[in-house]
């Protein structure tokens, strides 16, 4: 059964809010929005539209700029103030493993804006724009709230972006080169449109549009990477970037994605006729029908193509090359940069290391596999499971840190980190993918179809979270994580190819709330060598 409503479970966490106040009203110039004072010094303006609804014939197309006249006429008749105190419907969810997606709404191109109390035009606070993770398949910004960040540091504006996911955001077929039929990378274009809206209107909320930092985790970090490498409007719309656990995700061509489109159309009952006919059928299909169709490709019985998920593709317009070759060619925004990953994360598994690598990057050739495999000899590991986890994790995600930082640090200030604190809700695991999200967002644990549980933090965890938030927001404010760090936190040395420093982010092992557990380390030579070989594979798709 496919749900069409938002659902959230909150355990052990109570907002410290003061409710709705007439003082927390922002006039954008085309409509007034009533915010919600969720903390004593933080206001949340939730569900602010940044583009026209991508519904009906706009399905699978690039977003249109917001029609502010329509908003004025339909939502602010007679000078009424629009309620922005409740989270909006999130974007249609894709499947997670064997679990169904489908919850949410297509009318989801919104942002949540978190401001200090009293922020107004002229405050000129720096701005953080956040793209959530979820494999470009799922994710609900409600799972990662930022009002407590503003409460701790009331010197910034934070904007969290809803963008289209799975087939609704990333369906591709070669015929989209004729833009009358549809548009490539619609979900990525949603993010760009959100940045354009921020550039135009964030000053009304107290933000400085010339001081925007983009940030994301997982596929959100991958989005940051793509914007840095390919988005022509990057220098005009942001001045610094943070990429958390950005995958080395392959970027397939439209031709490589066509079998997935054909399968999807067939499963939706739209398999007959020309591509134009199929698209017309798909635009008329129900959300439930399309949700089931996008889930079917994940079944083990579907083997028409190794590219089984809807994701950003090499469209030749927005994304003009594979990421690593583009980086090595120097095609990237020269702006201050933070990049890191967790200690034990990986995004792929398999019966053995070569199978895992080929599952993640179908185009990798045997010669590259052999060259890489030689760097992970079995005697170097206490167990085969650790060997496979290390090899798969380096290849799929952790080497993004080394590859990007090595290039970036030649030209701009660059900092890297290794997040090393386990998510206590998964005590048997290592420091897995997204472990930092649990800590930085109030004990947030995501579940299926946009649902989330907040378990809250202990005093020690809160103390550690405050250190991370201070580093992050110092970078947003000044382009340097050290300027406004907490006094107990160590100086975070920059990265370069001679002194490859990174901050190891962890709480005090003894559980202190007044001492830091964070320390500096340097990358070891073997790690650098592995990532250098991974980044030079001849069959480069990622």
Image (cartoon, rainbow, N blue to C red):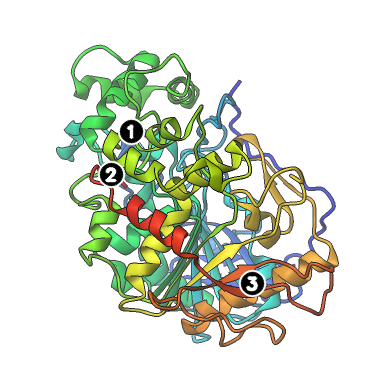
Closer to the camera in the image, 374 or 218? 374
Residue 173 rendering spot, x and y as whole percentages: 24, 31
Q: Nearer the viewer, mark 1 or mark 3?
A: 1
Q: Secondary structure at mark 1?
A: loop
Closer to the camera in the image, 324 or 337? 324
> For mark 2, does the 10 Å Cα neighbourhood hold few (<14), some (14 to 19), or many (20 or more) residues?
many
Which of the 4 image quarters holds residue 157? bottom right
Q: Left or right of 273: which side holds 448?
A: right
- Alpha-carbon span between mark 2 and mark 3: 34 Å
Quadrant the N terminus occupies: top right
Residue 118 rendering spot, x and y as whole percentages: 64, 81
The label on residue 415 is none
Residue 83 rendering spot, x and y as whole percentages: 62, 58
- Alpha-carbon span between mark 2 and mark 1: 9 Å
Which of the 4 image quarters holds residue 489? bottom right
Which of the 4 image quarters holds residue 280? top left
- Alpha-carbon span between mark 1 and mark 3: 37 Å
Whichever of callouts 2 and 1 sits on the residue coming sooner in the sequence is 1
Whichever of callouts 2 and 3 sits on the residue coming sooner in the sequence is 3
Q: Is residue 65 above or below residue 99?
A: below
Q: Secondary structure at mark 2?
A: loop
Residue beneath disc 3: 469
The label on residue 541 is 2
> For mark 3, does the 10 Å Cα neighbourhood hold few (<14), some (14 to 19), or many (20 or more) residues?
many
Residue beneath disc 1: 362
Check contact, mark 2 vs mark 1: CB within 8 A.
yes
Q: Secondary structure at mark 3?
A: helix
Residue appearing at x 19%, y 51% in the figure: 317
Residue appearing at x 29%, y 61% in the figure: 229
């Amino acid at each position: 059964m496919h749900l069409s409503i938002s659902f959230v479970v909150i355990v052990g966490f109570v907002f410290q809010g003061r409710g709705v106040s007439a003082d927390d009203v922002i006039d954008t110039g085309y409509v007034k929005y009533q915010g919600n004072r969720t903390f004593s010094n933080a206001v949340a303006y939730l569900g602010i539209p940044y583009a026209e609804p991508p519904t009906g014939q706009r399905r699978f197309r690039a977003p249109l700029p917001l029609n502010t006249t329509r908003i004025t006429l339909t939502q602010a008749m007679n000078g009424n103030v629009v309620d922005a105190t409740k989270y909006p419907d999130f974007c249609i969810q894709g499947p997670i493993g064997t679990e169904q997606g489908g919850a949410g709404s297509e009318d989801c191109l919104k942002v949540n804006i978190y401001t200090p109390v009293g922020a107004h035009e002229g405050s000129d606070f720096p701005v953080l724009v956040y793209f959530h993770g979820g494999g470009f398949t799922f994710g609900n910004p409600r799972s990662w709230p930022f009002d407590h960040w503003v409460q701790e540091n009331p010197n910034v504006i934070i904007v969290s972006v809803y963008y289209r996911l799975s087939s609704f955001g990333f369906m591709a077929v070669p015929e989209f080169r004729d833009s009358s039929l549809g548009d490539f990378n619609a979900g990525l274009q949603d993010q760009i449109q959100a940045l354009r809206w921020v550039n135009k209107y964030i000053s009304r909320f107290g933000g400085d549009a010339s001081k925007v930092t983009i940030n994301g985790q997982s596929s959100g970090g991958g989005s940051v990477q793509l914007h840095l490498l390919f988005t022509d409007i990057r220098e005009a719309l942001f001045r610094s970037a943070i990429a958390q656990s950005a995958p080395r995700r392959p970027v397939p061509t439209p031709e490589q994605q066509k079998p997935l489109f054909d399968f999807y159309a067939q499963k939706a009952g739209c398999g007959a006729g020309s591509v134009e006919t199929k698209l017309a059928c798909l635009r008329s299909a129900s959300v439930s029908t399309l949700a089931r169709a996008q889930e079917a490709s994940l079944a083990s019985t579907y083997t028409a193509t190794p590219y089984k998920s809807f994701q950003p593709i090499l469209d030749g317009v927005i994304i003009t090359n594979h990421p690593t070759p583009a980086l090595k060619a120097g095609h990237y925004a020269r702006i201050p940069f933070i990049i890191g990953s967790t200690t034990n994360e990986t995004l792929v598994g398999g019966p053995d290391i070569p199978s895992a690598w080929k599952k993640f990057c179908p185009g990798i050739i045997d010669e590259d596999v052999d060259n890489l495999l030689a760097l992970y000899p079995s005697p170097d590991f206490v167990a085969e499971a650790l060997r496979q986890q290390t090899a798969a994790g380096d290849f799929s995600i952790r080497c993004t840190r080394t590859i990007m930082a090595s290039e970036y640090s030649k030209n701009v200030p660059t900092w890297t980190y290794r997040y090393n604190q386990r998510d206590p809700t998964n005590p048997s695991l290592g420091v897995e993918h997204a472990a930092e999200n649990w800590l930085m967002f109030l004990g947030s644990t995501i579940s299926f179809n946009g649902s989330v549980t907040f378990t809250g933090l202990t005093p020690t965890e809160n103390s550690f979270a405050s250190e991370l938030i201070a580093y992050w927001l110092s970078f947003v404010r000044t382009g340097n994580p050290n300027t406004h760090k907490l006094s107990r936190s160590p100086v975070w040395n920059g990265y370069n190819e001679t002194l490859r420093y990174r901050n190891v982010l962890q709480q005090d092992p003894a559980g202190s709330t007044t001492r830091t557990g964070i320390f500096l380390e340097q990358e070891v030579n073997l790690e650098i060598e592995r990532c250098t070989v991974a980044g030079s594979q001849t069959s480069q798709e990622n």
